Amino acid sequence: MSVQDPSKRLSALLKKLRTAYPDAAAPQPELIDANDAVLDQLVFSLLLWESSSTQAKAAMRRLREAFVDFNELRVCLADEVVRVMGDRVPLALERSHRLHAALMNIFNRQHECGLTHLLDAGKREAKAYLESVDGLPSFAAARVLLLTLGGHAIPCDERLRDLLAEAGVCDALATPDDAAGWLERHVPADEAQSVYALFQAWSDDKGHPPRRERRPSLPTAEVEPERPQPRAAKPKAVSRKPGKTKARGGG
């Protein structure tokens, strides 16, 4: 990273955040399936990506009230999920397509909408699985690994990356994945959850929403490529050559 002394800036930033947010805690989902905390956390983390805790909690509550379980949510069209979540949710359409792609991929791999098998998997195996789920942002995969499976990760989306860049901790041109990788190397595993909680509180307080809706680019049948429209036929040129006129008048 191109900033000067980023590790010292990180230490100073964390000290400042601990003073500003003494009661910081990572928000937890309102359960859709009490028997599958991993999948609940995955869905909530996807809702929290590029959003705020308040927006994610409201969207999760609406999903819980509208759908019986994750399987019913899986088979719904993206437009319907947008209507349930509310169109004020940032990146609502992209988020819906990502949610559908993730649940479909999990169902096709596990033959059910469930992730309880990750509770018994090794940390590396669980990380590799989460990072391979279709449509799942790195932020969401890291958050599930950190909060539900006890792995070492620092979730970072564009909202947090922008704040870190403003604080001089990372380069403004760094991707969220670059920033997350750097943070993981500088934050000890036993401090990762408390540091992430501070970052999330900071993002909720000072983070900026995405500037515009992004077009979905996911491996899902619901997203079809735009087809070129046929060109309209050019109208025939009208002759402007004067023609003969018939004489009018009586016989």
Image: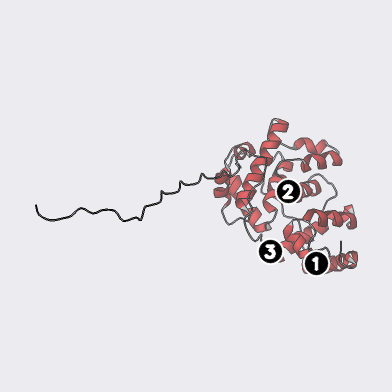
Camera-nearest residue between 215 and 234: 234
**Where does the N terminus fall, quadrant-wise?**
bottom right
Q: Compute the Cα span from label 2 to label 3.
A: 18 Å
Compared across the picture, whether 50 is left or right of 189 comes to: left
Sequence-wise, which precedes: disc 1 or disc 2?
1
Is disc 3 surrounded by few (<14), some (14 to 19) or many (20+) residues within 10 Å?
some
Residue lying furthest left in this view?
251
Q: Which amino acid type is shown beneath numbered disc 1?
A: Leu
The mark that comes first in sequence, 1 or 3, is: 1
Q: Which x, y percent locates residue 153?
A: 83, 51
Asked whether residue 86 is in view, the answer is: yes
Indicate the quadrant where residue 97 lies: top right
Residue type, numbered disc 3? His
* Alpha carbon separation for disc pair 1 and 3: 17 Å
Residue 17 circle label: 1
Q: Which residue position holds label 2?
A: 137
Which callout, 1 or 2, points to the residue nearer the camera? 2
Q: Secondary structure at mark 3?
A: loop
Q: Which residue is mark 3?
A: 208
Disc 1 versus disc 3: nearer the observer: 3
Q: Secondary structure at mark 1?
A: helix
Q: Amino acid at mark 2?
A: Pro
Residue 35: x and y in percent read: 70, 38
User: How is this picture coloured?
Assistant: secondary structure
Label pair 1/2, CB-CB below 8 angstroms = no
